[in-house]
Amino acid sequence: MLLLAKDVGGLGLYYPGQALLSRLPRPLLRQAARLGGDVVRALSADMDEALAELESLFGDRPLPQPAKEIVRDAWRINMFNELEVLRYPHYTPEDMDAVCEVVGLEHLDAALAKGKGALILIGHLGANQMIMPALGHKGYAMNQLSAPPPVWAEILKETRTTPLWRKVLARRWELEQRLPVQHINVFKFLRPAYDCLIRNEVLGLAFDGGGGRRWTQVDFMARRSNLSTQPLQLAAKTGAAILPTRVCRQAGTHRHQVVIHPPLQLESHADRAVGFQVNMQAYTDIFAKWVEENPAEYLYFLLLRRRVRASDVMPFFEDYPALPGQMSEQDAREHLRRAGASH
């Protein structure tokens, strides 16, 4: 019943609601997100899991605010980000200053001046997809390596997918495709990702996704995390700079901020595996500081990774509780390949 209510609400949001909410004045967007987030949270059965993820991540570290407030804000932030998706088709270059401030463009320009492309490395923190309109509408040749939303219906076919949810994901994908960006499916051949960097373009990708063939393990706050080495492999083969980038929104505001940091200084090692581990740890240390500042921006994604752990090639965190039906690495890889190939 809760799943049906969630799917009906999502369908209403993305179809009849899209016309209204996409034109809502930005100052009212935050109020709508607070209300919508609170309603969805009240219908959710995930509160205990959310608190468990938060506790596992921080360990003995102090929380920046009470745990229940972080959970409350996580649902509100996620709703705000969903409402932004509804507005994607209506963004124009002239609108973007009111929507998003970009800081650190000099680092991106310096990287592109070398002629080897630039990797905008993000995590699923806050409105991470805002890098697409923020840079695309400024005239940068923007590419995004990610999974098309409908792929999730295939990945979670046995546990989550419903006909209504498929319609919601299809609508979201329709809206995302109207952004000024070239989408590259992370579960298909990655030749387009290499090619765009060779053409000296910008490639956005998340370090904490489930795609990849080579993995390394790092400390992520109080946990051990398995990360794909894909960003380092792309950089090694193309010479592209890796620019750690954060998308955030200050509490009480309706404007996002994309902060592009100086390039990651990669260490060279004779042992390739050691180099992967050291350099992914360096990026994770930067990202972890952002999470510590505002874990509410990351908590909803942590719940997602927890839910899909049975079909992940590698679990995001090593300390996940055991789950019946856990796929082997080989089966999970084939499962994701088939899901990605469907779109």
Image: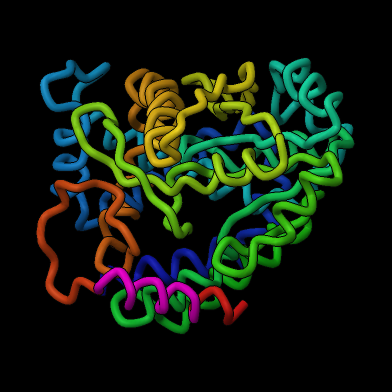
Q: Is residue 47 above or below residue 164?
A: above
Viewer-proximal residue among 213 and 55? 213
Q: How is the image coloured?
A: rainbow
Image quadrant containing the C terminus: bottom right
Q: Is residue 330 magenta?
A: yes
x 57%, y 22%: residue: 264
Q: Is residue 88 magenta?
A: no
Range covered by the magenta-colored residues: 328-338
Percent x, y of residue 213: 45, 59
Percent x, y of residue 102: 71, 22
Residue furthest to the front? 270
x 86%, y 46%: residue: 199
Q: Is residue 206 above or below residue 312?
A: above
Image quadrant containing the N terminus: bottom left
> Is residue 46 left or right of 336 when viewed as pictured?
left
> Is residue 157 left or right of 238 when viewed as pictured?
left
x 58%, y 35%: residue: 121
Viewer-proximal residue among 193 and 305? 193
Viewer-proximal residue among 26 and 305? 305
* Residue 279 shows up from this direction: yes
**For residue 324, what is the image quadrant?**
bottom left
**Looking at the magenta stretch, what is its main secondary structure?**
helix
